[in-house]
Amino acid sequence: MTKSCVAAASPAFLEAVRQIVGKENVIHSAAELLVYECDAYTLEKSPPTLVVLPNTTAEVAAVVRLCAQYNLPIIPRGAGTSLSGALLPVDGGVMIALTRMNRIIHVDTRNRRALVEAGVVNAWITQAVKSHGLLFAPDPSSQSACTIGGNVATNSGGPHTLKYGVTTNHVLGFEMILPDGETVWLGTTPDGGEDVTGYDLRGSVIGSEGMFGVVTRVLVRLIRSPQSQKTMLGIFESVDDASQTVSDIIAAGIVPAALEMMDQLITRAVEEAYKFGFPLDAGAVLIVELDGLSAGLEKQSQQVIEICRRNKARDVRLAQSEKERTDLWKSRKRAFGAIGRISPNFLTQDGVVPRSRLPEIMRFINATSAKYGLRIPNVFHAGDGNIHPLVLYDERDADQVRRAIAAGHDILHKCIELGGSVSGEHGIGVEKISFMEAQFGRDSLDAMQSLRSAFDPDKRCNPHKMFPGSKRCSDFSPRRQAAV
Amino acid sequence: MLLQPVNLDDLVSQLRTANAQGNKVAGANLASMNRLIEHVPEDMTCTVESGMNLKQFQSQLATNGQCLPIDPPHAGRFTVGEFIGRNLSGPRRFGYGTIRDYLIGIKVVLADGRVINAGGKVVKNVAGYDLCKLFVGSDNSLGIVVEANFKLRPLPPATAFVGLMCENLDAIDRLIDSLMKSELTPTVMDLHNLNLQGSDFPYAFVIGFEGSTDEVDWQLAKARELGIHESTTSIPDTDFWDDPAPTKISILPSQLTEHLRSLGNAQFIARAGNGIIYHRGRTENPHSDLPVELFRRVKSVFDPNHTLPEL
């Protein structure tokens, strides 16, 4: 555990924060701060100095200004579901949690947009616009908990990004408080046109893991709900056959809404947990969802079934009702949760390879599992080439922890070697910093740092993330001792 | 000056020299860097050099049954680099979006000669900041894009355009409203008044459908029910686009007809579903508060000597 260097808030700072947001919206007791010591990446923990829960943009701006004045790090936070330690308060700092700012401000059905506060939960948006035949496309598995602000920070994906794209394709603009306390609007304004003059800073902020400022309000794009859906479950003897099917579907010019794979280990765990009716002896299953106009779907689903059969699918089942479809997706989206039944701990990787290299990376994962003597189930966004191997280990056994980390490293380096990326949707956070230079090289990382310095010259906003050699502890808060 | 590099190394050294000597660079002629480096149909991605002609790029992709679904008018006049630098788009942006939705990786030479990469070759990638977005529409002001990776789409098996001549803007408003509420999924929704002066119907509305034959046929039948039935084509590449280029405005789509009224009889082509109007009337850009100070800082961290052009 890292010891927090911004150890305690000075009485003057604490009083000033309370003045801004009210006493009840400031958390500073050691016991309560433990809740915020990590996100869903639990290998490292470190509590923030203070957590502030503002209710308005003006409050956020005032708190950020105050932190600038006291030279304190700030860590913007949504629901804390990040899987890469993007929210770890490495050396402490003031965590600004947006969860109280959770209002859907305005829905504009004619222009297919909605203006929401950053703390609005992802799934609430679709719930609010469903009756108009609209939806918000990004659907991360954590969508019933994660916030839109968090989605912007990590450029979240989800199973349906294959056809519809990720967060950056569905966020038109947002209000953001820069680390010096200034409020800016980047991208399309709520009553403005979609093309905006100047640099696309909206696009650069999305996926910057909260390092450019605190996003407070977001203008999202809504899309028309598909008229019809066909969801199929292909059952295969081997991961190899299922992987080849994925490549063949894409090569045939079919773009499914979602194309997901689960191997035998994960299918068994999921079946035990949720009793959907998955076969326990299949090498792998593919979930293929087609959507669009009813007129074209029948033929397309026949085509998919043929491709599955050509790759020796044992069976292809079609979801017969909306309930069956929903149950299938529930099982898929809660797959990580089922792992608890077969292992005390797991380490998720999030690499990406070109889709045609899927069979190769899956064979490599299998070999890695054998090499380190650890089980590695797989449940992932096959259509995007975005793998999620879950390296199982027991944290009470130091050697297993070491092997699990080594196995994860091998897999990610293989992804880079195959022309891919170390993260498709979970982000770099603190977890994958050591891979950045291998993937991008020094000059490209410097260019990223240059962009960061335009937003945050002091590197005070969500520090110690993403880049190798991020400055630590002693660089911050020279005034701390004087204030305390 | 306009650089004329023979290859990437040459561009790097020319730019480095210009930057060191305080010379201004307007851009680079990348005619020597004009290849489609890779197109992997099973991955639905490609890597192309910026100097390649956009039209040639599209026809090479088409030989493998794929395309980049962005169709600016007169594609043959632009290189891929100009296309990215000016963030060009066309009628299909209603169904498919714009460059930022397809550009997954870039290679850029910065003002001081450093060569950087951003993004990658895979369709989903959140490692590092998304610098690709920054260079779309940046028109050589932050660096010279020399290579681009795009995600692609399959060429649609069927495409059809239907149109309707309209008497007045109120009728168009109602029509768009009913289209937006319908189950139709057009990929093109255009409105124009070119070559219609003196006609009883001063406005032409054009929508396009793409997909399987079944999907397109079903939509044509539905469109007919809404009164849109004249078989037509996409708006041809007219001299409307020639120098001087028409003015572009981007407004809330629901305010389209209101803005068109204010243009009087001026020639226009509008991407009606997107709220984009290209016109030859008086310029009345809607006021907006841009984060200009932030733009200035971004420019100065990437090009501190201002070697490259201003945006």
Image (tube, helix red, strand yellow):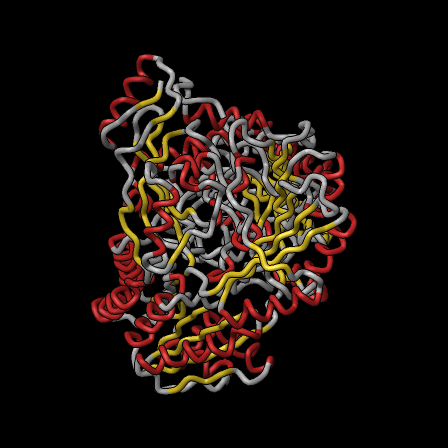
**Quadrant of the image for the C terminus of chain A?**
top right
Is A70 placed above or below A265 here?
above
Where in the figure is residue A483, as x and y percent of width and height? 58, 28
| Residue sitting at the far right | B170
Residue drawn at the location 37% of the way across and 25% of the way down: B27
* Among the 4 quarters of the image, the one containing residue B270: top right
Residue drawn at the location 56% of the way across and 56% of the way down: B187
Considering depth in this image, is A294 or A271 the residue closer to the camera?
A294
Considering depth in this image, is A409 or B182 the residue closer to the camera?
B182
* Among the 4 quarters of the image, the one containing residue B302: top left
Considering depth in this image, is A312 or A157 the residue closer to the camera?
A312
Where in the figure is residue A42, as x and y percent of width and height? 45, 58
Count the numbered circles shown.
0
Where in the figure is residue B62, as x and y percent of width and height? 36, 55
Where in the figure is residue A149, as x and y percent of width and height? 59, 49
- Residue A32 appears in the rendering: no
Considering depth in this image, is A150 or A125 the residue closer to the camera?
A125
- Residue A167 appears in the rendering: yes
Left/right placement of residue B250 relative to residue A21 reads: left
